[in-house]
Amino acid sequence: QVQLVESGGGLVQAGGSLRLSCAASGRTLGMKSMAWFRQTPGQERELVATINRSGELTYYVDSVKGRFTISRDNAADNAVNTVHLQMNTLKPEDTAVYYCSVFPYQDWGQGTQVTVSS
């Protein structure tokens, strides 16, 4: 099982920036893609961005392209890995609880709330 702890959320005005971080533990993490998802009340969880094991390949949902950047730090022994989400030019529609996960995206942390005011 993977343990995930997200941090870095908060309240920011539109146009501002936040950097989310997620500490993920599990001995096979270095071999797997990682991702950020977000969810608003009454809506399904939405995939925001993914990053492969080496960090060379990334994917972004269209609504965040050019504004969000995903990155990761792999521990030497793969015991703990960290994934980040740099969010710039934030919009009110980015307001959500943000979750990180590790492929196959079945384990979840408590999430971190991001609120963007207009």
Image: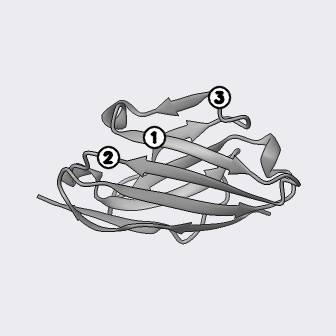
The residue lying at 33 percent from left, 38 percent from top is 67
Label 3 crowd bin: few (<14), some (14–19), many (20+), radius 10 Å: few
- Image marks 2 and 1: residues in contact by CB distance under 8 Å: yes
CA gap, disc 2 to disc 3?
21 Å
CA gap, disc 1 to disc 3?
12 Å
Q: Which residue is mark 2?
A: 88
Q: Nearer the viewer, residue 84 or 35?
A: 84
On-image quarter of the C terminus: bottom left
The residue lying at 19 percent from left, 54 percent from top is 92
SS at mark 2 in the image = loop
Label 1 crowd bin: few (<14), some (14–19), many (20+), radius 10 Å: some
For the question of whether residue 45 can be seen, the reply is no
Left or right for 32, reference 19 = right
For the question of whether residue 94 can be seen, the reply is yes
**N-term-proximal mark, 2 vs 3:** 3
Residue 1 falls in image quadrant: bottom right
Left or right for 78, reference 45 = right
SS at mark 1 in the image = strand
Residue 70 in the image: above or below residue 9: above
Q: Which residue is mark 3?
A: 56
